[in-house]
Structures are given as structure tokens and as C-alpha cells.
Image (cartoon, coloured by chain):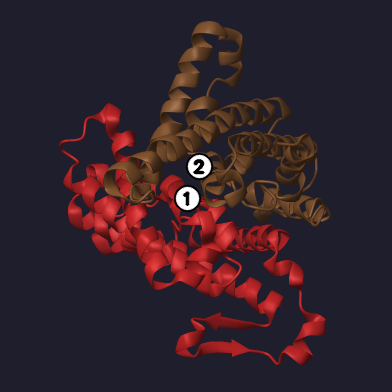
Amino acid sequence: MANATTDLQQFKAGLFENNPVLVQLLGMCPTLAVSNSIENGLVMGAAVIFVLVMSNLITSLLRNRIQAHVRILIFTLTIATFVTIADMALKAYVFEVSKKLGPFVPLIIVNCIIICRAEVVAIKSSLRRSLADALGCGIGFTMALCILGAIRELLGAGGLTVFKDWGLAWHLDPKTFEPHAWVIMIMPPGAFLTLGIVIGVVNQYRARKAKGGA
Amino acid sequence: MDFTSLIAVFLGVVLVNNFVFAQFLGICPFLGVSKNVSMAFGMGCAVTFVMTISGVVTWVIVHLILTPLGSRFLGNPESLYFLKYVIFIMVIASMVQLVEMYLKKFFPSLYTAFGVFLPLITTNCAILGACLLIDMNEVYQSSLVKSAVFAFGGGVGFAMAITIMAGIREHMRFSDVPKALRGAGITLLTACILALAFQGFAGIGK
């Protein structure tokens, strides 16, 4: 793990060299489940960023008061509280997407990224460092979801739809595309396939970079 | 309550809506603990065990405690539902602890067999996922027996998936996998092919 020295480096580490999904392989379940479209990825990412920032904030503020043996319990309860808030907010403002995400919003409670960040960083770092780390990891997670979502949606549905009401949608002509659609990409096997290949590509890139740098 | 509908629930969750291959629950242990068959099977059994118990306990808490309390004191049966997630995760954590203590006292051999897996299960999203799915589905809301069968079936489906995967990975140890795909990459690609096979069950029992 890269040893970050400044808050900015800590932030950047979460985005690229320590990306929670593609490098550390944390939070696989939501990654696979909600990456069937870029829209789901964005909404899920926003929820995770919110919960991650709030849990890191609380943990960091309480870091001198939490006894070591109850820390996991406190992390979990903090996270569960903020997940409840995020779930209610999503149901109120983006109901359609929140219905599609189904149990995966409440499942943020057991998302290993959040507990991992609380345990590795927030419990022993200053408030600024913890927040920088939470934002970095959260945005890194969202980025990974969006990359996977974009690949799967392009190949499986022939276009990208981001919040149709706002006019942010782009689609190939369904008549020309449909005979060539890889429907499997938006179904469960496509998730495993895309993530496997993307992780392979990332590993290859990192191996080459390490060789070049040394 | 007829027996065939229970069998339909069970087969549905084991084969058609398999927790791992169709619903993406419990992927972390599926990738992490699937290196050899006996460990994978132990993990599967421990998950089945805890999943069945927590599925039943959370159902009982939601329908026999939260709902009556809400309607009696606050006038609306759903007014305490915001506590659900916090309660679910606490039930699972304490269930795991309880099961661990019980096994240690009365079945020491089983305890050593489950070993490290029991504490890991608290953060296994398949367990919380089962509780949430039971809570969201109207069929299971109305019937405790069906919920119990669903939770048990979910665990069996998970155990089956992780054991199959471990069997394949044991053989793959001798194959020449491209360097970049070693570990998680090739496991995910294998899971893709398994998921394709499980897609064949889709539509059964409808």
C-alpha cells in the first residue's frame, strides 16, 4: 500500500493506485450487482460516498474515545444509521432507481470498503485526512462502477442513459442495434465477465508500470 | 400451507435465483474462501446455519415486535420501520456470537471445523441480503415457514456455489493462467461461465 504523506495524496490514492474495487477487490457484491447501467452506478456511488464520508467523519471525531474492543460494533452502528438516512433520501428523490437497486442500498451496511476505511484510516487519523480518504475511496468506487456500467450498457443495450428526464441520454438506433445486442452483458454472467476482464487489464497495466518504474 | 409451494420456494432460491450467480450476494467469501473444497464446504455450512436462524429471528422481530409496537403506541404499523436496518445488523452480529458460544460449549468438533469462518459471517452480505429480501417480498412477509425455507435455501445455494467453485479452482491450480488474470480475474471469468450455466434454470417454477 502506498504510504500517503499529504491529504491530497491520500485522496488520489483512493482514486487510482489504491482503487477500492479494481485494486483492493473490496465491495465486490454491489459492484457486480449494480453495474448494469451507468445510472445505477452513479446513484449507488453517491450513496456510498455519503455514507463513507459520514462514517469516516464520526469515527475520526470519536477516535480518542472509542475503546478498541467495541470499535467494530460502533463502526457498524454508525454505518447502519447513515445507510438508513441514505435509503430514505433515495426513496424520496430517485424512487425508480432506488427500486432497481433493491436490497443493495441497505447492503451498504456490510460493504467492506466502509469498514475497511474506518479501521485503516479514520480511527487513527485527523479529521481532514479521514475526509480526504473517504472522498478518494468513494469517488474511486463510483468511477469503477461507472466504467463497468458504461461497458455493460453500451454492449448490452446499445447506448447510455443518465437520468432521462434531464435529457442526458444517447442511444444507437434500436433497429440497427438490436440484432447485434449482447443481451448477456446486462444479465448476471456479463457482470462477472466484465469485472474479470477489467481487473485483468488493470493488473497488466500495473505490472507494466512497475517494471518501467523500477 | 401446502408442501409443493415450499419446495418451489426452496428450488427457486437454490437454482433459479441462486444467491451468488443471480443475485450477487456473498461475493467476497465466494472469491476469498474458495481455494479448497473442504474449507469452502465448511464456510457454506456455517453460512446456511446462521442465515436460517437470522432469517427467522428478523422476521419475528419485524412482525411480532416492531409492527405491533408501532400500531399500538404510534398509530401506524410502519412507524418503527426506520429501525429495521440497525436491528437486522445487530441481530446478525449477536446471532453469530451466540452460535459461536453454543457450538464451542456443546459441539467442540463442529466449532473447530467452522473455526475462523464464524466471525467472518457477520459481514457476509448474503446473510443481511437474505433478511432484506425476506423483508421486501410480500410472499415471505405473510408466512414465517416460507421465510425460513427461503433463508435455508439461500444458504444451501450459497454452499453449493462456493463448493463448485472450489472444486474447479483446485483443478485450475495446475493450469497456465495468464499472469494478469491470476487470482481474482480468472475466478471471476470462471464464475461467469458458471452463471451462464445457472441461467439455464431461469423460468423454472414460474
Contact (Cβ within 8 Å) of mark 1 with mark 2:
yes
A77 left or right, relative to B181: left
The chain that hosts pointer 2 is B
Q: Colour of chain B?
A: brown
A60 left or right, relative to B82: left
Coordinates of residue A43 in the picture (x, y in percent) = 45, 69
Q: Residue at x 65, y 33 (%)?
A: B152
Question: Toward the viewer: B51 or B136?
Answer: B136
Q: CA distance from mark 1 to mark 2?
A: 7 Å
- Residue highlighted by disc 1: A107
Q: Colour of chain A?
A: red
Question: Toward the viewer: A195 or A51?
Answer: A51
Q: Residue at x 70, y 76 (%)?
A: A155
- Residue highlighted by disc 2: B128
Question: Is there any visible trace of residue B46 in the rendered image?
Answer: yes
Coordinates of residue A28 in the picture (x, y in percent) = 55, 52
Coordinates of residue B120 in the picture (x, y in percent) = 50, 32
Q: Which mark is residue A98?
A: none
Q: Are tags 1 and 2 found on a single chain?
A: no
B117 left or right, relative to B84: right
